[in-house]
Amino acid sequence: MTQSPECNQRRGIKTLEPDTVQETSPRIILHLDMDSFYASVEMQERPELKGKAVVIGADPKQGKGRGVVATCSYEARAFGIRSAMPISQAFVLCPHAIFLPPDFSRYVKVSADIMAILKAHGFPLQQVSIDEAFLDVSQLGTFAAAANLAVRIKDTILTRLGLTCSIGIAPTKVVAKIASDIHKPGGLTAVEPENLFSFLAPMPVRKIPGIGKKTETELFGMGIRTIQDLAAYDTRLLIARFGRSAIALQEIAAGIDRSEVKERDGVKSVSRETTFTENTGDEQLLAATIDALADEVCRNLSDESLHCRTVTVKVRYEGFITRTKARTLPHFTADPATVRTCARSLFCDIFDGRKIRLLGIRLSSFDTCDSRQMKLEV
Ligand code: TTP
Ligand code: MG
């Protein structure tokens, strides 16, 4: 990073001691995120949908549907529709939109094609979700070379798969991710080390991955609105409010992020949830749903050759009150019966008899079959 501490003081930005932040050759991280992924896959396969407001998610049932929007085309976003919005609200915003159910297996296949295109360039690759990945392209040596690579990747994905993506390039993973998001769709944004602070400083704190609505509200209450405000805030007061994690947060705000592109860190969790057509307190139906969800997530687990240790059950009661409870098992497992038993017991712990709108199960803390095998052999 080339900016002097004096210059940062003038801007009100904190830095660590120069010797802990100076890097002789800065890393170059590329973050790619597909544009309106599920919707774009559908539009690619059905050209008559191109240019239309397309919403992927639950059946809207003329505005009486339940469940949420998974994603929507940018044309639909112009009407205010967003991911995770109730599908009934999406219908009100744009009744003439084309509503389609998600076709997950199709998206997983396209995702694998995208990752294969990225992997072919031979750089360390970390897939972080179905439609996004980091590449550590530091070996290219310059940001200009990284930008050329980004253009080639965008072209290949467009030519071979007919899909667009957005790419961010920066010296850290966090900034590369923020950069890939700011000129969507079809963006390419490079933040060179000397521009790191001026890029981050004016952004709203919410841009930092991990800062959600709740933390944002608390930060606003403390007078912290921009990333620069966060970087300049008294660290002791931040720790008093948010605990030790405030240190990492403040480092990110100052452009410091040492996290590496980890090749085997792909899938972090596998989850499935279902929204009932009508809120229900029928214990038999709830138990059967838990079993079906457990079987489904276990199938996903074995597709990915993974074993998990942590099972989380999510219950959303009528009125949108959500409870979750997690348990970490003593051993890694992919066994549906084990997951079912654990999920049922977690459900019993949080079920208070009220009617339920949604049930979900998430599996996390993974070990791959390969690494488990290796441990057994030791
Ligand atoms: P995102 O990359 O967050 O969204 P996106 O690709 O649809 O749009 P953008 O151009 O803003 O990147 O998520 C990737 C896919 O994950 C998305 O196409 C659908 C799915 N998804 C959900 O099912 N529910 C959600 O709440 C979100 C955010 C995404
Ligand atoms: Mg995306």
Image (cartoon, rainbow, N blue to C red):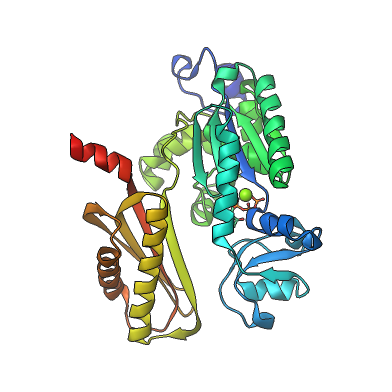
| Residue 14: percent from left, percent from top | 52, 27
Residue 83: percent from left, percent from top: 61, 61
Check the picture and name the quadrant holding the C terminus: top left
Residue 202 in view (yes/no): no
Q: Which residue is farthest bottom?
A: 282
Front in this rendered view, residue 275 or 159: 159
Instruction: Point out the image quarter for the N terminus.
Output: top right
Residue 31 coordinates in the image, percent (x, y): 59, 36
Residue placed at 36% from the left, 73% from the top? 290
Q: Is residue 357 above or below residue 142?
A: below
Which residue occupies the extreme top position in the image? 24
Q: How many marks?
A: 0
User: In the shown orientation, is residue 344 left or right of residue 300?
Assistant: left
Residue 175 in the image: state x and y as whole percent.
58, 34
Question: In the displayed structure, does residue 301 sit left or right of residue 105?
Answer: left
Which residue is found at the position 30% from the left and 55% from the top? Answer: 310
Of the pair 13 and 349, the residue shown nearer to us: 349
Between 282 and 176, the one nearer to me in the picture: 282
Question: In this view of the protein, can residue 22 be seen by the observer?
Answer: yes
Q: Is residue 230 left or right of residue 294?
A: right
Q: Residue at x 62, y 69 (%)?
A: 101
> 364 left or right of 376?
right
Q: Reply above or below: 102 against 254.
A: below
